[in-house]
């Protein structure tokens, strides 16, 4: 089991834990009150900084209910935090764009993350034809 050093910037958010003890995703929470007007962008502080193990990165995405509950979209759609973002002041944030006026409260669960190993080093070999099964191109799955 890998150990991860974590610093909390506030005691007002719940400590990190796996979602329902079953998922391999971990919820992140708003660390301060945030009011957004429709069309506004903000960085929402998540109240944590971590020192990830060498060779790992965190993938941060909205929760499935984030848009429905708060009307916000994560502007980079998928955040990547690598192990070099590990200093004492390297707090994690969620960059968001509001599509409606909204209020986010301290401790609201707004996104989630998981820790992944870095992609292995690969080399690309150019070929004239791929030998895999042809599925019919983009959007072909489930076609009647």
Image (cartoon, rainbow, N blue to C red):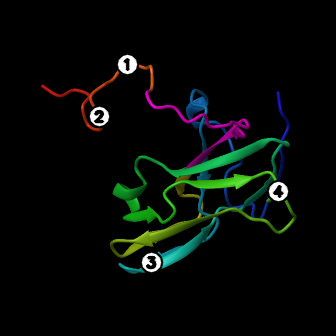
Q: Is residue 39 above or below residue 110?
A: below
Question: What crowding class fits label 4: few (fewer than 14 Cα within 10 Å), some (14-19), or many (20 or more)?
Answer: some
- Per the image, the residue denoted by label 1 is 133
Looking at the rendered structure, the secondary structure element under dot 2 is: loop
- Per the image, the residue denoted by label 3 is 36
Query: N-terminal of the two: label 4 or label 1?
Result: 4
Query: N-terminal of the two: label 3 or label 4?
Result: 3
Looking at the rendered structure, the secondary structure element under dot 3 is: strand
Q: Mark 3 or mark 4: which is in front?
A: 4
Residue 10: give x, y in percent of width and height: 75, 64
- Per the image, the residue denoted by label 2 is 137
Magenta residues span 112-129
Question: What crowding class fits label 1: few (fewer than 14 Cα within 10 Å), some (14-19), or many (20 or more)?
Answer: few
Residue 126 position by quadrant: top right
- CA–CA distance between discs 1 and 2? 11 Å
Question: What crowding class fits label 2: few (fewer than 14 Cα within 10 Å), some (14-19), or many (20 or more)?
Answer: few
Query: N-terminal of the two: label 2 or label 4?
Result: 4
């Amino acid at each position: 089991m890998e150990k991860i050093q974590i610093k909390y910037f506030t005691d007002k958010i719940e400590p990190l834990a796996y979602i329902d003890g079953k998922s391999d995703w971990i919820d992140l929470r708003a660390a301060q009150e945030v009011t957004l007007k429709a069309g506004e962008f903000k960085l929402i502080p998540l109240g944590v900084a971590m020192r990830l193990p060498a060779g790992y990165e965190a993938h941060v995405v909205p929760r499935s209910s984030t848009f429905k509950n708060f009307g916000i979209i994560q502007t980079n759609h998928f955040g990547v935090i690598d192990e070099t973002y590990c200093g004492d002041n390297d707090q994690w944030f969620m960059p968001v764009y509001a599509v409606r006026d909204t209020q986010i409260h301290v401790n609201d669960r707004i996104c989630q993350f998981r820790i992944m190993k870095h992609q292995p080093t690969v080399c690309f070999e150019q070929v004239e034809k791929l030998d895999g099964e042809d599925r019919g191109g983009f959007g072909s799955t489930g076609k009647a």
